[in-house]
Image (cartoon, helix red, strand yellow):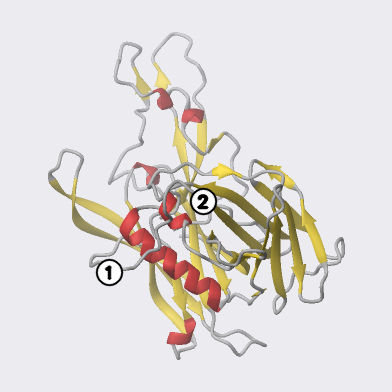
């Protein structure tokens, strides 16, 4: 088993994730009336080797589970600090505004202990501003480990069957040199696995491609932790997630874990997201997007604005899970006869799978 720990300079964009609870607590939710569009601003400022900020602005209509967000273009998005240094974010796509902030290239400096604010002006003249967010340091985790567990699940046919899962837990310090506070933490996850096509039984078969598939993991859960609730210096054996032990692990699998620091306000926001997800599904459904955050319409404070801007530092760890061919075989058979009608298209072209690439990741070193 291999693991690597280092501070990441990459920005987490899939703002996601928590958990379908076994017992549901009654929660009062503000449901937007009628068909009125509601503004959602989601932003994250990351302190790293090269700091980055990414902001997504969308509209959501009525409180509908599968409402498709409408991207907001032509906005003026400005990041500022408490010293009144400012930088404008360029548009990088539909409703997306991003900027890389190398040290010394801009008047604004991204650092732990700094405090930052985001302002947004829409093309119709409306102005929005976030509350000031402080950037806290993140502890570097000591280790991530996993165990194999089995429990009964209901399969697609409606029958009960035993399913194996990998359960991941983390060990991380809760204290840091030079910082006396207790951390608020959030985790997100990325899975990467190898996927090999089938060879075709013909005289001159096409070459077999090997793809590497990247996919967000555990999107139905938000995993957070309040360090203020623990007087110990170490968080040990904290459960993070479980994944079905399936074909993805037949050729090797890397779990990339991102541990982020949060402000108290950001922690409370993600906790509310977790409560909504426990009732509704994944973060990419519409209702979780409609959780009020830290933005205000300057001219009309009564307007409901959803989403959140937060500043964070991130530590990253990768854990390799070696293949276990005793439990399961590859998704695609090694050889396919041309007359087989049930062969899946992805077994002939692995690039059809979402998140696939032929380029071997730099970190892939089992």
Q: Position of residue 33 (x, y in %)?
A: 42, 53
Look at 55% across and 62% down and name the residue there: 303
Q: Earlier in the sequence, mark 2 or mark 1?
A: 1
Tell me which corner region of the image, top left, top right, bottom left or bottom right, holds residue 11.
Answer: bottom right
How packed is label 2: few (under 14 Cα within 10 Å), some, or many (20 or more)? few
Secondary structure type for disc 2: loop
Q: Which residue is mark 1?
A: 26
Look at 48% across and 73% down and name the residue there: 268
Q: Residue 220 versus residue 57: which sits nearer the camera?
A: 57
Look at 59% across and 56% down and name the residue there: 41
Q: Which residue is mark 2?
A: 366
Residue 23 visible? The answer is yes
How packed is label 1: few (under 14 Cα within 10 Å), some, or many (20 or more)? few
Cα–Cα span, label 2 and label 1? 46 Å
Q: Quadrant of the N terminus?
A: bottom left
Determine the residue located farthest toward the left in the rendered image. Answer: 159
Above or below residue 193? Residue 127 is below
Look at 55% across and 55% down and name the residue there: 40
Q: Position of residue 361 (x, y in %)?
A: 59, 45
**In this picture, residue 224 sits left or right of residue 7:** left
Q: Are marks 2 and 1 in contact (CB under 8 Å)?
A: no
Q: Position of residue 253 (x, y in %)?
A: 45, 49
Above or below residue 303? Residue 357 is above
Camera-side mark, 2 or 1? 1
Above or below residue 257? Residue 197 is above
Residue 50 visible? The answer is no
Secondary structure type for disc 1: loop
Q: Position of residue 139 (x, y in %)?
A: 58, 76
């Amino acid at each position: 088993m291999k693991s690597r720990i280092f501070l990441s300079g990459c920005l987490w964009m899939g703002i996601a994730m928590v958990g379908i609870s076994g017992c549901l607590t009654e929660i009062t939710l503000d449901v937007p009336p009628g068909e009125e569009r509601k503004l959602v601003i989601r932003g994250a400022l990351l302190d790293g080797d090269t700091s980055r900020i990414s902001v997504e602005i969308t509209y959501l209509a009525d409180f509908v589970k599968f409402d498709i967000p409408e991207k907001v273009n032509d906005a003026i998005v400005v990041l500022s600090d408490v010293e009144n240094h400012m930088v404008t974010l360029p548009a990088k796509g539909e409703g997306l505004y991003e900027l890389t902030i190398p040290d010394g290239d801009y008047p604004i400096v991204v650092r732990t202990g700094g405090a930052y604010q985001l302002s947004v002006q829409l093309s119709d003249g409306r102005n929005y501003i976030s509350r000031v967010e402080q950037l806290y340091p993140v502890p570097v985790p000591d280790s991530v480990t996993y165990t194999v567990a089995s429990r009964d699940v209901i399969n697609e046919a409606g029958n009960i069957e035993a399913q194996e899962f990998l359960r991941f837990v983390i060990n991380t310090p809760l204290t840091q040199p030079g910082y006396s506070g207790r951390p608020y933490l959030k985790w997100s996850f990325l899975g990467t696995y190898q996927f090999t096509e089938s060879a075709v039984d013909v005289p001159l078969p096409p070459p077999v491609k090997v793809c590497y598939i990247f996919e967000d993991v555990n999107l139905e859960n938000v995993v957070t932790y309040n360090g203020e609730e623990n007087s110990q210096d170490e968080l040990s054996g904290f459960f993070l997630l479980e994944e079905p032990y399936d074909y993805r692990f037949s050729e090797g699998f890397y779990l990339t874990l991102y541990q982020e620091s949060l402000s108290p306000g950001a922690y409370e926001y993600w906790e509310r997201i977790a409560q909504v997800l426990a009732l509704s599904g994944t973060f990419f459904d519409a209702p979780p997007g409609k959780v009020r955050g830290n933005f205000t319409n300057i001219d009309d404070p009564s307007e409901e604005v959803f989403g959140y801007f937060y500043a964070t530092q991130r530590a990253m760890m990768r854990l390799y899970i070696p293949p276990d061919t005793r439990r399961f075989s590859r998704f695609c058979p090694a050889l396919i006869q041309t007359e087989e009608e049930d062969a899946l298209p992805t077994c002939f072209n692995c690039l059809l799978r979402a998140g696939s690439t032929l380029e071997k990741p730099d970190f892939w070193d089992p």
